[in-house]
Amino acid sequence: MPVPINWRPGQRTLALLVAFLLGAPGQLLSGPSWNGKKCAVVLTYDDALEVHLDRVVPLLDSLGLQATFYIPCGFSDFQKRLHDWRWVARKGHELGNHTMFHPCEGGRAGREWVRPEYDLASYSLGRFADEVAAANAFLEAMDGRKTRTFAYPGGDTLAGGVSVGGVVRRHFLAARGTAARIETLDSVDLYHIGVYLVNGQTGEELVRAVREATGKGGLLVFVFHGVGGGHSINVSAEAHRQLLSYLASQRKEIWIAPLVEVAHFVRERRGMAAGPVAR
């Protein structure tokens, strides 16, 4: 026979509150959690393409949106328009580190474009670290900023068979990976952030992904290359415009920010250190 509990004043209310909190965590997480918004969306653009300057940045600026551009600092298309890229940074966009020469593992299928001298499989860890540091110095000279994020070129994380994770953690607040997923505030690995790779989707499909992230209260990181041309991985200019217009219309519910700002926010929420200074 159960033993009756003689509750003291206030104990029953406290016990019920504790039971509610332990039994229904989903209700606590369903409200705004991303900087006061329901979800977070990050727009990232890779490889410093001319179309980013000529088509993407003007559209972002016209809608009041900010993004992250991952820059391979040794690429000629980037170097011939340094003045324009400085203005991109001044407008609040992040210039993220994508190394100097975009080294990738050349032995993989479809990697015929990788030049032998930039085959990541032949890199030492020291060479990779030097290239990352050189790119950081270049970017700091461009924008004056000492913290930024990284994107693994080709999604590759080994240099000569050795993990580059330690190098990346020493230099960056966070790193964008290539795994396809919507992240959550509690579980996101800041050094392997999941993504949504954009390649040929319609505007409706891109908007649908945002709605899914909003429903889940998650973080959605888009990866763009070509926009209306400029790269073999491409999305139409109209689909891109449709996505950005939708995001601009949903700012009351969606936090749209460069990845470096989202990384700062996650670190603060977790009580982590502010993170490494790019060097």
Image: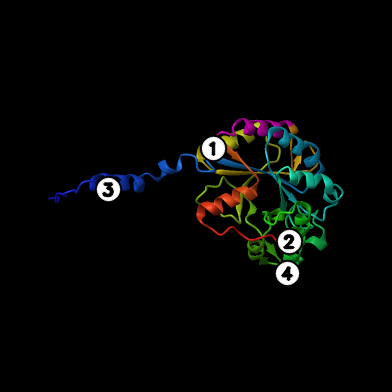
Residue 13, placed above or below residue 165? above
Q: Which residue is mark 1?
A: 214
Query: What main secondary structure does the magenta stretch of the protein show?
Result: helix
**Element type at marker 2?**
helix
Name the side, left or right, on which 34 lies relative to 20.
Answer: right
Q: CA distance from mark 3 to mark 4?
A: 57 Å
- Work out whether mark 3 precedes mark 2 in sequence or the reverse, and give the earlier one: 3
Tag 3: residue type? Answer: Ala
The label nearer to you, 1 versus 3, is 3
Q: Which residue is mark 4?
A: 126
Q: Residue at x 72, y 36 (%)?
A: 61
Residues at marks 3 and 4 touching, judged by CB atoms closer than 8 Å: no
Residues at marks 1 and 2 touching, judged by CB atoms closer than 8 Å: no
Q: CA distance from mark 2 to mark 4?
A: 10 Å
Tag 4: residue type? Answer: Gly
Q: For the residue carrying disc 4, how many other residues have a C-alpha within 10 Å: few (<14), some (14-19), or many (20+)?
A: few
Q: CA distance from mark 1 to mark 2?
A: 34 Å
The label nearer to you, 3 versus 2, is 3
Residues at marks 1 and 3 touching, judged by CB atoms closer than 8 Å: no
What is the span of residues highlighted in magenta in the rendered image?
238-252
- Work out whether mark 3 precedes mark 4 in sequence or the reverse, and give the earlier one: 3
Q: CA distance from mark 3 to mark 2?
A: 53 Å
Name the side, left or right, on which 232 lies relative to 198.
Answer: right
Tag 1: residue type? Answer: Thr
The label nearer to you, 2 versus 4, is 2
Q: Which residue is mark 2?
A: 132
On the image, the x and y values in percent for residue 140 come to 75, 56
On the image, the x and y values in percent for residue 13 come to 26, 44
Nearer the observer, 219 or 92: 92
Residue 18, placed above or below residue 272? above
- Please identify the quarter of the rendering in which residue 160 is found: bottom right
**Element type at marker 1?**
helix
